[in-house]
Image (cartoon, rainbow, N blue to C red):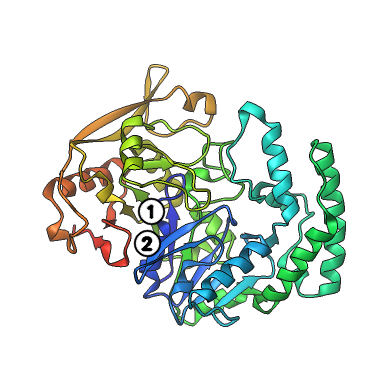
Amino acid sequence: MNTLVIGSQWGDEGKGKVIDFLTETADCVVRGQGGSNAGHTVIANGEKYVLHLIPSGILWSGKLNVIGNGVVINPGYLVEEITMLRNRGISITPENLVISDRAHVTLPIHREIDAAQEEALGDQKIGTTKQGIGPTYADKARRLGIRMADFVDRDRLLKVLQDRVKTANAELIRLGWAAVDPKETIDTVMEAADVLRPHITNTIPLVNNAIKAGKDLLFEGAQGAMLDIDFGTYPFVTSSNTSAGGCCTGSGVAPTRIDKIIGVCKAYTTRVGAGPFATEDDEISDYLHGLGREFGATTGRARRCGWADGVVLRYSSMFNGFDEMAMTNVDGLDEMKTIKICTGYELNGEIIIYPPALIEEWDQCVPIYEEIEGWQADTTSCTTWAEIPEKCKAYIKRFGEIIDCPVGSIGVGPDREQTIFVER
């Protein structure tokens, strides 16, 4: 069984936990897009791990973890992540972690370009994490990129770094930004390359041969589908395809090889950074932040919070082809007396059930809510579907009807054991 897991909202849906849970029966975990701007928080054996580039399967022994060709890799960050995990007793070798030779590289200077470009936007800032992701994907599209294949030979790497840092510094100066020290930048990357070199390989035949051999593969998406550069709230999106199709392109695996696609959503909605958010609500935001919830794994920023958005999820389910939804953070609504689900938007006097393309129209959308009675009971101690409160079951059932995708599992806490399969 080859399973693909995609965040269905704007990221931070709890994909890391879902992927970690599913990894137990997988042989290989593949990451296909994004970069160090993404973060998966996983609670395993009572310990908290925040992963940015390495697939979540690394926390299990005997699993092959693949960083695919669609990922943009900050080599220094990746080395730091490897070191952190090793210091915590996690074994990382070329046998359990491989990196695509076709993956593009995020240089330290890309972060400077990212910051300079964001600053130049003034009041129109996108709200990027300033990790250099956009400039790296731009280099890829402009055919200026450095790839992990360039890391294999030190002399070649030194030459391509010298050339790219020179042209990138010229870009920074044009943006009114200070140039970076070429030697410091190059030395940093060269040092990281020495650590990563043994892990670099052609992962495309590796992954496809695993499928041919009957292995079970798990494909993990980064961020969320509504940040997809084609389908999301453009221009307030990331620079890659965060959808199911992007995972296939970013791993070199044909869509026909995927057996099941699972979307991950929260029982409510969150978003980090700027951009439209029709169901954003101060009441639920203050409530969740007061519980110590909803702070970004990568940035630490307080997430914007709102009610469940059926318009977004209906649309996301459609273009990703979800077979089912994994709903996390159900326990976050345990104390709510009344819970809302958005069923449509009112735009210029008309009711729409799918999102508009233009940001100006997004900003004019007024959510139409259906109110559901809350269960006002603790779900964190539940271990079976039978123990879930009936009113909670009713919310989950109605949720699936509104988004036209059944909920297959729910999360009632951060631990692996706090995942419950829905009985239908």
Q: Which mark is residue 135?
A: none
Q: Residue 392 location, x and y as percent?
A: 18, 47
| Residue beneath disc 2 | 18
Name the secondary structure under disc 2.
Answer: helix
Q: How many marks?
A: 2
Crowd tier of the residue under label 1, counting other residues whose Cα lies within 10 Å: few below 14, some 14–19, many 20 or above = many
Percent x, y of residue 362: 47, 28
Left or right, residue 359 beside residue 331? right
Instruction: Estimate how packed mark 2 is, as few (under 14), some (14 to 19) or many (20 or more) residues with alpha carbons within 10 Å.
Output: many
In this rendering, position of residue 131 left or right of residue 273: right
Quadrant in which the C terminus appears: bottom left
Quadrant the N terminus occupies: bottom left
Determine the residue positioned at 43% across, 45% down: 9
Pinpoint residue 134: horizontal percent, then vertical percent: 66, 47
Query: Taking 78 as reference, is 348 above or below it?
Result: above
> Is residue 123 among what the camera can see?
yes
Q: Which mark is residue 264?
A: 1
Please state which amino acid type lies under the numbered disc 1: Val
Tell me if 185 is positioned left or right of 307 in this view: right
> What residue occupies the far top of the structure in this picture?
349
Does dot 1 land on a helix, a strand or a loop?
Answer: strand
- How far, Cα to Cα, is label 2 from label 1? 8 Å
Going from N to C along the chain, the mark reached first, 2 or 1, is 2
User: Is residue 103 shown to the viewer in this render?
Assistant: no
Of the residues shown, which amino acid type is indicated by label 2?
Answer: Val
357 vs 378, nearest the viewer: 378
What's the residue at 67%, 63% (across, down)? 76
Quarter location, residue 386: bottom left
Residue 327 in picture, x, y percent from top left: 31, 52
Q: Residue at x 71, y 69 (%)?
A: 192
